Structure formats: C-alpha cells, structure tokens
Amino acid sequence: MAADPSDPVRQRDAERTRAEILDVATSEFAEQGYAGARVDEIAASTRTTKRMLYYYFGSKQGLYVAVLERAYVGIRALEQTLAVDDLPPARAVRALAELTFDHHESHPEFIRLVGIENIHHAEHLRTSPILPGLANPAVDVLGRILERGVAAGLFRDDVDALDVHMMISAFCVFRTANRHTFQAIFERDLLDAGRREHYRRMLGDLVVEYLTAHVGRA
Amino acid sequence: MAADPSDPVRQRDAERTRAEILDVATSEFAEQGYAGARVDEIAASTRTTKRMLYYYFGSKQGLYVAVLERAYVGIRALEQTLAVDDLPPARAVRALAELTFDHHESHPEFIRLVGIENIHHAEHLRTSPILPGLANPAVDVLGRILERGVAAGLFRDDVDALDVHMMISAFCVFRTANRHTFQAIFERDLLDAGRREHYRRMLGDLVVEYLTAHVGRA
DNA sequence: GGTACAACTAACTAGACAGTACATAGATCG
DNA sequence: CGATCTATGTACTGTCTAGTTAGTTGTACC
C-alpha cells in the first residue's frame, strides 16, 4: 500500500520514513530470512516506495545490516539498565539470567535475526562498522559478579564470564529459536505461558547450582 | 560438472543417483538455507542434471524435505546405540550428554538444517509423513535414567526427560549454531579444539549438578 | 532381437527479483 | 519568490531461477 490515499497531504519526514522502513524490514527479514525476504514485499508494506529503500540503505544487504545494527544496539542499551552490584553473588547471577530470559522471550525477532545471521556465517555482522566492537554490558556485569562470588569462596573458579554468558544464552536462545521443531517433534510448546515460571526457575537453578557446586565442601 | 567425460560408459544406477543428489543437496541447503539454495547449483555439483532432481523429488521443496528426513533418521539411528542402563544414574546422564555433545560437534550440517527449519516454523518437517512420529531413543533412555535416579533419592523430581533433553540440546546446539555471531562479537571460537574438553566437562557438570542439587540434604 | 519401461539429457520458458533512470515536488533560506 | 537541495514517485530492465518440454538411451524380460 504505497502512497496512502487517505493521507492526501504527504508530509516529508526523513527520520520517520527511515524508521518505518527499518521496522517493516526487521519483521520481513526475521520472518523470511535474508535470501527469502523480498525487497518489493518490504516496500509494499511501507507508506513509501522501493526507491526510498535504495535511497536510504543502498541495497538489500545494506538494509539488512542496518536492521541487524539497530536490533543489537537496542539490546545492549537494555542490558545497561542492569543494577545488581549490591545483591549477593548467587542472587545477582539469577537476576541477570532472568533478565536475559525475559528479554529473549519478548524479542523473538532478535533471536531469529541472530539465527539467520549465523546461517550466513555472521558475514554481514562482520562487515558492519559498529557491530563487532559494540560494548557488552551483560558480560561485564557478569564478570564482576563472578569475581565477587569467587573471592567470597562461593563460586567455583574454573569458568569465566563468557562461559556463563554462553550457558545462559544457550538456554534462552534455544527456547525461542528451536521452538518450532521441538514442538513438531515432542508436542511441547517451550513458550507455553503455563510453563514459563518452570523454565525461568530452571535456568536460575541451573546456573547457580553449577557455579556453587562442591565449593567450600569436599 | 554434469556428465563426467572421464566416464564414457555412463552406468545407470537409480539408487546411486538419488543418494548423490541428496548428499549434494544436504550441504547446499545447510550452507545457503532453503531460499538461498539454488536448484541449478545443486544439479551442477552432481554427475547428473537438474531434470533428475525433479524426476526423483518433484520440486525444490520435495528435495528439501527428503534431505531433512534422511538427516533425522540418521541421528535417531545413532541414538539407538546408547547403552547406559547399567551405569549409575549420574554417570549415565553424563554419558548421554557427552554423546549428544560429540554428535552435534561432528554433524554441524544437521544443526544448521534444524536451525533453517525453525526459521520456516518447521512447516516442512510437519508436512513430512515420517518425521513428526519418529521415535526418540535419546529421550526414552533419559526417562529411564531419571526414574532410576529419582527412585534412588539421588535426583530431584521436578523435571522430566524432555526438560533435561532440552537443557542438553540447548548447550550443544548453541555451541555449533551460534558459533559465528559469538566469535564475531566476543572473539572466542566455541568450537576451538583447545576448549573442547572444557565445554564437554562443563555440560556434564551442569546437568549433573542441577539434577543432584539439594537432594538428600536440607 | 524386439519391446516396454526406467533412467537419463539438453534446451527452453514464464515469472520473479534486485536494482535503476528519470522526473518531480516539498522544504529552506536568501 | 526563486534557487537549490533533499525527499519522493513511476516505470522500467537485465538477470536469475524454479520448473518443463520433448525427447534419447540403457536394461530386463520375453
């Protein structure tokens, strides 16, 4: 539906047009994959035309990279709201894990984009000037929590922040990313609302039990 | 390279041709995704022509479903070799987790196919007449181990086999599936040979510590 | 040794797709 | 109130791509 006829006085607004294209492109790429997404389809779902898409983003790939960048930047901004430095270590890891859990659950399109990007060996992510160097608040916070936990003799010391981040991500990403094959094969919907608390606690237990195992005993 | 000229006497062999097409299609689909894979490209990497591909599989989608079916059937067959019923429960779960770990590490194209299938909401998997009903040896074995563990008072009783299977899969799938974005962002190769044992032990610890946490104490 | 069917090939086509040439209209500022 | 630049729209194109048409050749069996 290009050029909405119910809006006869077409206002110019570069930022709005850009943002609208990015919104539509995000869901189209997340839904269809990079190769499966259609530039014409994205343009048609916009109040503007395909020409604008090339005007602002240069190419299909340019648009895709812009979508990826915006998605990552948004998540990193959210991670920065983390304030768990006064919680005891075990409580803090659990809080962080649960924040990741909640975030991934409410941003399935981000998870899908990451999955798609992995299919393409992260080649687009790598070509982005900003993405590879983006700061990682969650991992930094995790690093400080682990330090405190190890210093207090509560946590094991043979893992680093990246390992624990990987554990948490793996659980949360799988639940969203592999939902469909899991349901088709096992007839269990991992995102069923009734199971949500179960999995949330399971993740927290998993991480905390692992970190505190056999420490101070034996 | 259709019609290899170094083989002047072209032998007819339906099974070989079929299998060769499936081999090539498996890597092409795993590498490029469903929409990104090119039928011409698959045909060109075969000793036969595109027409044969349609002769045997009807359509691009038919070929893709056949690839998926063969991949799943292969894995299920491998899972059936599991024999851990005489090991003590904790040892048995660890063995099963490590088998999944090893398997996923050595079959990245299967992991990729599953990821691709999830992008498409498992619609192809669902249309397959055999895939949704395929038996699941790993989950059955896991169920028996958990029963033994709970009965012996060693394991917690608030998880079922599917939950534990999910935990194990999540860890193993993430390591392979998200390898590229993880490396691009954190500069750590999750499949680095030097880290392999670390992650293998980490997975075993994770699952066993979780299952045995607070049981028989408190 | 002929016939019938399965296995196979080459060349083609219609439609889809990313990308573009060219024209024009709103905003901004003198 | 005109010059100029930014934003926008229409209509088009060359190429790629899944799928097909119209056959030919090997092989098993009578």
Image: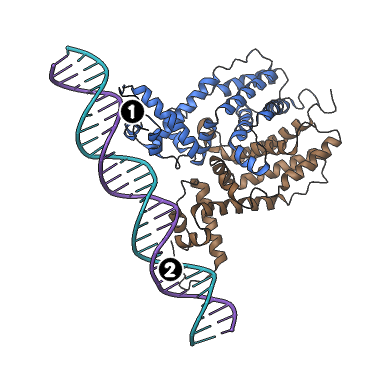
Chain colours: A blue, B brown, C cyan, D purple
Q: Is residue B75 above or below residue B49?
A: above
The residue at which mark 1 appears reads as A5
Numbered badge on residue B5: 2
- Please tell me which residue is depicted at 55% across the width and 31% down the height of the picture: A108
Q: Is residue A135 visible?
A: no
- Say which chain tag 2 marks: B
Circles 2 and 1 on the same subunit: no
Q: Position of residue B163 (x, y in %)?
A: 71, 35
Q: Is residue B13 visible?
A: yes
Q: Position of residue D4 (x, y in %)?
A: 18, 22
Which residue type carries mark 2? Pro
- Please tell me which residue is depicted at 38% across the width and 35% down the height of the picture: A44
In this rendering, which labeled residue sits more in front, label 2 or label 1?
A: 1
Disc 2 to disc 1: CB gap under 8 Å = no
Which residue type carries mark 1? Pro
The quarter of the picture where the C terminus of chain B appears is: top right
Disc 2/disc 1 C-alpha distance (Å): 62 Å
